[in-house]
């Protein structure tokens, strides 16, 4: 007998690729929201207006604080959030070295739930 449990994890940091279509950025966000998590979405600095308008739509339809938007360089914005220890899950699309740095920045990396799509550009 197999049992599956679906439950919210907590606060999920979602990072999509900076050089890819919009759908890949939201491929990490939508499942996290559907499972009842709080989401921090780090959006690419390119195409920011599209993300801002999308986040406004989410803000109008979801409870306050459910989705937070962060923009800027991933190297400067993400490590402080990971170091805080308040992030429960990391949904990341990108390079393995960048993912490794983020995971190691978390004070309890073994507690962190990971959803990774790494090195997609090399496929």
Image (cartoon, helix red, strand yellow):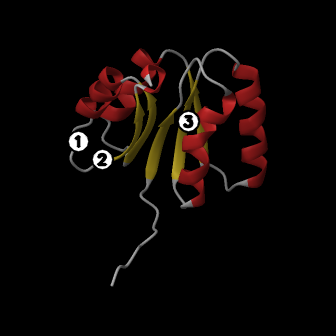
Residue 86 image point, x, y percent? 36, 44
Left/right of residue 72 with respect to residue 82 in the rendered view: right
Left/right of residue 68 with respect to residue 102 in the rendered view: right
Which residue is tagged 1? 109
Residue 104 image point, x, y percent? 23, 31
Residue at image position (35%, 22%) is: 98
Residue 43 image point, x, y percent? 59, 26
Quadrant where the image shows the N terminus: bottom left
Instruction: Compare marks 3 and 2 and give the one earlier in the sequence.
Output: 3
Q: CA distance from mark 1 to mark 3?
A: 20 Å
- The image quadrant that residue 70 belongs to is top right
Residue at image position (28%, 28%) is: 100
Whether tag 1 and tag 2 are in contact, CB under 8 A, the answer is yes
Local crowd size for mark 2, using a 10 Å CA cut-off: few (<14), some (14–19), many (≥20):
some
**Placement of 51 over or under 60, stated as above or below:** above
**Placement of 90 over or under 25, stated as above or below:** below
- Dot 2 lies on which element? loop
Whether tag 1 and tag 3 are in contact, CB under 8 A, the answer is no
Residue farthest along the front direction in this orientation: 123
Q: CA distance from mark 3 to mark 2?
A: 17 Å
Instruction: Compare marks 1 and 3 and give the one earlier in the sequence.
Output: 3
Which residue is tagged 3? 41
- The image quadrant that residue 81 belongs to is top left
Which residue is tagged 2? 112
**Placement of 78 over or under 87, stated as above or below:** above
Quadrant where the image shows the C terminus: top left
- Dot 1 lies on which element? loop
Whether tag 3 and tag 2 are in contact, CB under 8 A, the answer is no
- The image quadrant that residue 3 belongs to is bottom left
């Amino acid at each position: 007998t197999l049992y599956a449990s679906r439950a919210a994890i907590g606060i999920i940091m979602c990072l999509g690729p900076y050089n890819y279509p919009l759908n890949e950025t939201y491929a990490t966000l939508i499942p996290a929201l559907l499972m009842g998590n709080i989401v921090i979405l780090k959006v690419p600095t390119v195409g920011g207006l599209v993300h801002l308008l999308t986040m406004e739509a989410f803000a109008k339809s979801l409870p306050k604080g459910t989705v937070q938007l962060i923009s800027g360089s991933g190297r400067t914005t993400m490590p402080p959030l990971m170091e805080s220890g308040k992030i429960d899950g990391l949904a990341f699309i990108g390079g393995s070295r960048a993912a490794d740095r983020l995971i190691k920045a978390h004070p309890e990396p073994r507690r962190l739930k990971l959803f990774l799509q790494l090195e997609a550009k090399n496929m």
